[in-house]
Image (cartoon, grey):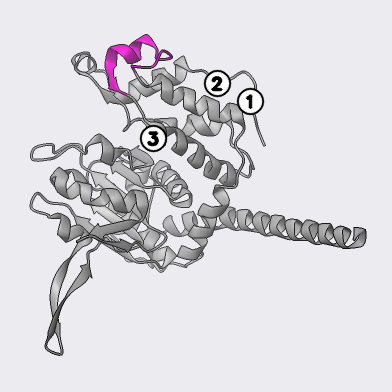
Amino acid sequence: MAATAMATEAEATATAQAASQDDLSLVKRMQEGREQLVEQLRKVIIGQHDIVDELLIALFAGGHCLVTGVPGLAKTLLIKTVAEILQVRFNRIQFTPDLMPADVVGSEVIEESGGQRSLKFVEGPIFTNILLADEINRTPPKTQSALLEAMEEQQVTAAGKTHPMAAPFFVLATQNPIELEGTYPLPEAQLDRFMFKIELDYLSESDEIAVVSATTQSHDNRLAHPLSGGDILEFQRIARQVPAAGEVIRHAVRLVHASRPQSPAAPQFIKDWVSWGAGIRASQNLILAGKVRALLAGRFNVSFRDVRALAPSILRHRILLNFHAEAERVTVNQVVERLLEAVPTPSVELEG
């Protein structure tokens, strides 16, 4: 019996070591794959380093991105190029005021076969791997909400039947901040489904010169395919296995709690300027995205620095300012910046 127990224990140890080696190999693959993906993107996209970094973090974490920026900053080209490199299905929906929910998720049609009529569900463009929701704030809330179930639960319900989405499933939605007439601001429930809200500005002079030079002459844009959709699913799995110390989780939760004016921990400027703070998804996303950021940096645990670096893009669309802030011309970015100052980093940094 003792010999059998020892053999079983040895087998379990060997299995655990093999699994550990497989995980380490996958992490290395993730780091190398990210570099190869960025290398391919640089053939097409010039500048926009922040959006590329956070888009890939969201993709590897299984989140979604909302991007706000003026036209011409390569938002559409970027996401289309990512889909091409990964060789996954890509669809683009141009959101307009007359777009209906059925135009997004699909609808049932009558099909006749052998003299018999039956209803058949015809999938809409949302059934893809990477979806570009272009100018999402130009369509009414009824159509915007068609994305809610798909983004959160990876499924669509139509006519009482549930239809699973393909995996991986990634949504990048864009908003144009300079044309607000005839737009419909996204409701808080919709905004909360996005891991990041990324704000783009104009390119620097040197980057713009490079763009003009590259796009006004013939060039070879053939792309390699270093990663696949299956790789992305494996990266999403391994990211969730990264440990996060209790103090790091506590710090993320404290940041989120401090953004709520109803919380006793909220600073006075939050009580003065904010009508609604971030919810629990903000805390979850700070840690999950932090895990991916840590792995890509070659670390195997989340640090306070990861949480704080990602906080602006995770919190800015989850904090709703009141009329006092608007009257004083306070922006949500200023509120998040002050919030990070009001909730300082704990004195002992945890690093891997």
Determine whether, in the image, residue 275 is placed left or right of residue 241.
left
Circle 1: element type: loop
Report which residue position mark 1 lands on. 349
Circle 3: element type: helix
Q: Is residue 231 above or below residue 313?
A: below
**Cα–Cα gap, marks 3 and 1:** 22 Å
Q: Is residue 334 above or below residue 37?
A: above
Q: Is residue 110 above or below residue 313?
A: below
Q: Is residue 266 magenta?
A: yes
Q: Say which quadrant the C terminus sits in.
A: top right
Report which residue position mark 3 lands on. 313
Mark 2: give few (<14), some (14-19) or many (20+) Cα within 10 Å: some
In which quarter of the view is residue 154 placed?
bottom left
Give coordinates of residue 263: x percent, y percent. 39, 17
Mark 1: give few (<14), some (14-19) or many (20+) Cα within 10 Å: few
Name the outermost residue toward the top.
268
Along the line of sight, which residue is nearer the eye, 220 or 22? 22
Give coordinates of residue 235: x percent, y percent. 53, 55
Q: Residue at x 52, y 62 (%)?
A: 231
Q: Is residue 126 visible?
A: yes
**Cα–Cα gap, marks 3 and 2:** 18 Å
Give coordinates of residue 174: x percent, y percent. 26, 46
Report which residue position mark 2 lands on. 345
* Residue span colored magenta: 261-276
Q: Amino acid at mark 1?
A: Glu
